[in-house]
Amino acid sequence: MAATLQNAEAVRNNKLNEQAVTEDKTDSRTSPYHLRISRLTVDKLGVKLYDKVSAVVAELIANGYDADAEAVTVRLPLNLQLASQAGGKLRDLGYVIDVEDDGHGMTPEEAIDFYLRVGADRRTRKNEDGSRSREKKRPVMGRKGIGKLAPFGICRRIEVWSAGGPKTKDGYAITHFFMDFDKIVTDDDEAVPLEVGSEDRGWSPTSGTRIRLTSFLAKRVPDKETFLRQLAVRFTFAKPDFKIMVVDTTANEAKPLEVTPLDIPLLPGSRVDLTKEDPVIADDGTTLPVSGWLGMAKEAYKNEEMMGVRIYARGKIVGVTRDFNQPAGFTGEFAMRSYLVGQVEAEWLDLDNGDDLVRTDRQDILWSSDYGELLRRWGAELIKKIARISREPRRVRVRDEFLRKSGIEDKARQRFGDKQVARVAVDLAKKFGGFAAEDELSDDVYVEDLSQIILSVAPHQALMEAFHDFTNHVTKGEASIEQMLDIFDKAQIAELASYAQIAAQRVRVIQDLQQIIDESTDENQFQKLIAQAPWLIEPSWIVITKNQSLKNFKHAFEQFWKRTHKTDVVLAIDQEAKRPDFTLVSIDGLLHIVEIKKADHKFDDSDFARLVNYVDAFDAFFQENRETVAEFYRGWQIDLVADGESLKDSSKRHAYLGLTKEKKINRMSWQDFLSRAKKVHEQFLEVHDLGAEKRQGKQA
């Protein structure tokens, strides 16, 4: 099939070439215009793309594969910096990286004619099948002709030693030379004479090639596990007669480590064998075969190498994708981009005579090309299938992850002395946990909030189950006093759990308020918070509701004030569009009229002059509108939150003291305001936790 595709591409290209020759009648020898390519182009368009040691080594390994090598050995120092750059000055540390293979090697003539021609496509050589290796007829990995310069992405000096050609009585002919980056990459297009090695034109008993890298840039070699993974993902290891060995030169007598295919644990039931799926179909009906596999990783990616789906052609990586280039917003997007893994092998992405669809750094393909678009559409359908078949395994994984992160089994045992309530809590956690948002499980606040909801619901669920069980026993005439007592115990646990949840939430609000005080001086923020949390004014367990009486009072008093004072006043019982003058809270028959001053503000003469007008107005309003204020049978009180008093005028000071004695004004500092509310709720939590400890002791 691949040969058919290549023949079709060749016919198309030949026609285009013939047309170009016919149209171009200009003799280049007579033209004054000549295109000159600077050697800097190699640096800018090729070498700078290889900035990782593993990427550079992979290019050299691929060259060994194309030379029919059966083994490539990489010798390098693992887990260290190759050069230092202290004070901005690069200093070489004397390290060496060797990449050696047992392939057919090169003669001096082959090195001059082919290896030292940068950018030449080996697959289009005349009178030679450059698309296949010389002896084993492997589909070659190389194409662009710049991989040989990849080492310049991490070093400044490359030594090339190779022995090849036909074997003679003296052995194989040796080519030996050095490439120095600073001499090669200049703004000049003349040929550069290279330094000749001492063994050049000599003989070797065996064939093969050794590339030695020295004079490094400030690059780091990763640790053993990471480096092996980085090499593993770059090849499919489809050929049994090819292996890669790595030797750590920092360890004495280190044994060679073989690079093996990456093993990624998958969710059970999520693996899809691509040879059993529909192939990619071109618009003209041509079948484009695909092999490999896709699936959902058992755990979220732990490292970069396990990330996404690796796409291969000719046994070498050509790209990595998490979603086959799907636009954002598709169903299951988070799960796919976090857990989708696989290996896709599509030889038609790198045909000999086709367009070059592979980016130079081999991190992606050209998705905008015809073949790229076909692969994108094919991948979209597979993503849907994998999302469907992995839905239940994913739910189990999310459930288990939630149970692990929340530690809800331990929390349930600690909080509830009743085994049945603890069991119900765990059962609820399993149900809720399976539907938790996958992307939120890394958020500790999300996990804790969901845990608290489950723990607050569990006692009520257990109580319902106990009632149901008791009813069944009553029907059968088997009810006992022990079952009745069990119901009472569960009812008490449920009540305490509800109060504990409320207390915990209120303590969190108080902590938020403390942060607002520390960071803001906007009094309007405080007024809004009081409207949302009126229990701050009266920190008790009395039920506080926003009733119709408050609304009636608000509108009636605002009109009364405007009629008598010819100005507007805004009373808040909820968040108001305008900044409120006061916030209203009704608690147990007493109307609290709350005014908040910013932290560190002392209540002064000007504040009192303004406030006393409202005192008179509230007195008059309550006298004249007894039906409107009937629900506030305990009257009214102004709650003033201000840090201290600074009344200079003696008459104002005496009047203020009189109003406080009459309980018309109740001033408290910010510290008292917060600590009073916090104390009530924290004490409840302490008592609740102590009760849990006692129940545990009793159970033990």
Image (cartoon, rainbow, N blue to C red):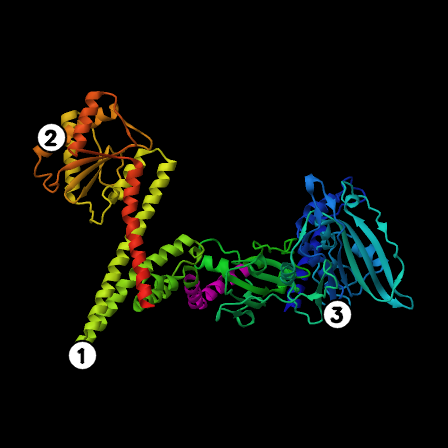
Residue pictured at 48% horizontal, 63% vertical: 381
Is 673 rendered above or below residue 52? above
Nearest the eye: 657 or 209: 657
Mark positioned earlier in the residue sequence (3 or 2): 3
Q: Is residue 378 magenta?
A: yes
Q: Secondary structure at mark 2?
A: helix
Name the residue carrying label 3: 136
Q: Which mark is residue 620?
A: 2
Distance between mark 1 and mark 3 Cα atoms: 84 Å
Name the residue carrying label 1: 476
Is 650 rendered above or below residue 561? above
Q: Horizontal placement of 376 versus 352: left or right?
A: left
Q: Amino acid at mark 1?
A: Lys
Residue 189 in view (yes/no): yes
Q: Horizontal placement of 137 versus 420: left or right?
A: right
Mark positioned earlier in the residue sequence (2 or 1): 1
Nearest the eye: 178 or 441: 441
Graded by Cα atoms within 10 Å as few (under 14), some (14 to 19) or many (20 or more), the crowding at tag 3 reads few
What residue span does the magenta drawing correspond to?
A: 375-402
Q: Horizontal placement of 334 versus 219: left or right?
A: left
